[in-house]
């Protein structure tokens, strides 16, 4: 995958772009038999969609990528549907699946940082970096980084898998978790 993150598009939208469009936490996909695809269009208006907000993500193999959020009651265009990300694993092209995860995080950050957390003033988007700044008190917010760890416990040709109670039946995982503030990665692995 040749993804180049960016905040501002290099040129005007004249070529089709990948659109990671969300209604809540559900991604808009084109339906295909035993597969799914991300919509590719010059703009959302061509799909009769009106976004609440949108963010430029960068380019994937030279093609522009955008993330957008629709209102809660928005309908999917014909031949498309809204689907959670987890069930799309293995149905979307791998590079688009991982980019969809990035896209939803950027949309969540944009939605939850419309106002300053210190003084309540509406924030402004900084033009040259992915940041929201308060024009009143100067507080700057960037997208959240949540450090995590994933560990494979091996013995001979076997791997230890775990299962959380909230997992669907027959879903297992290697050991993984988020790092708490002040906790070392080595401590989490123990």
Image (cartoon, grey):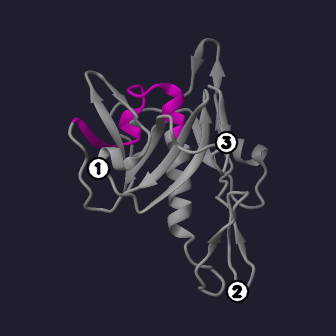
Comparing 147 with 62, the one in front is 62
Asked if one can make out residue 161 in the rendered structure from this viewpoint, the answer is no
Residue at x 57% of width, y 78% of height: 115
Disc on the earlier residue, 1 or 2: 1
Location of residue 33 (image quadrant): top left
Q: Which mark is residue 5?
A: 3
Query: Does 169 sit above or below residue 145?
Result: above
Where disc 3 sits, the SS reads strand
Question: Is residue 81 shown in magenta?
Answer: yes
Residue 129 in sight from this viewpoint: yes
Judge whether 38 appears above or below 159 on screen. Answer: below
Say whether disc 3 or disc 2 marks the residue closer to the N-terminus: 3
Residue 10 on image: x %, y %: 66, 43
Q: Which residues are magenta?
A: 79-99
Residue at figure coordinates x 60%, y 12% from the top left: 157
Q: Which residue is mark 2?
A: 136
Is disc 1 placed on a helix, strand or loop? Answer: loop
In the picture of the structure, the residue carrying the numbered disc 1 is: 48
Q: Nearer the viewer, residue 50 or 2?
A: 50
The residue nearer to you, when weighing 56 against 29, is 56
Q: How far apart, in angstroms, are the residues tagged by discs 1 and 3?
A: 27 Å
Which residue is found at the position 29% from the left and 22% from the top? 34
Dot 2 crowding, Cα within 10 Å, few <14, some 14–19, many 20+: few
User: Mark 1 and 3 residues: CB-CB less than 8 Å, in contact?
Assistant: no
**In the figure, is residue 51 to the left or right of 149?**
left
Q: Position of residue 2 (x, y in %)?
A: 65, 27
């Amino acid at each position: 995958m040749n993804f180049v993150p960016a905040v501002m598009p290099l040129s005007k939208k004249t070529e089709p772009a990948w659109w990671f469009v969300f209604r809540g936490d559900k991604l808009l996909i084109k339906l295909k038999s035993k597969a799914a695809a991300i919509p590719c269009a010059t703009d959302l208006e061509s799909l009769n969609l009106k976004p609440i907000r949108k963010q430029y993500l960068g380019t994937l193999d030279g093609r522009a990528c955008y993330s957008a959020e629709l209102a809660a009651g928005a309908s999917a265009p014909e031949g498309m549907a809204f689907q959670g990300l987890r069930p799309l694993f293995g149905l979307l092209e791998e590079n688009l699946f991982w980019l969809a995860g990035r896209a939803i995080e950027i949309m969540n950050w944009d939605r939850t940082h419309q106002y300053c957390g210190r003084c309540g003033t509406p924030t402004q988007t900084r033009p040259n970096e992915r940041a929201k700044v308060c024009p009143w008190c100067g507080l700057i917010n960037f997208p959240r980084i949540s450090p995590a760890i994933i560990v494979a416990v091996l013995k001979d040709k076997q791997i230890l898998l775990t299962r959380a109670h909230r997992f669907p039946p027959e879903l297992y995982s290697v050991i993984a978790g988020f790092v708490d503030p002040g906790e070392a990665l080595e401590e989490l692995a123990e």
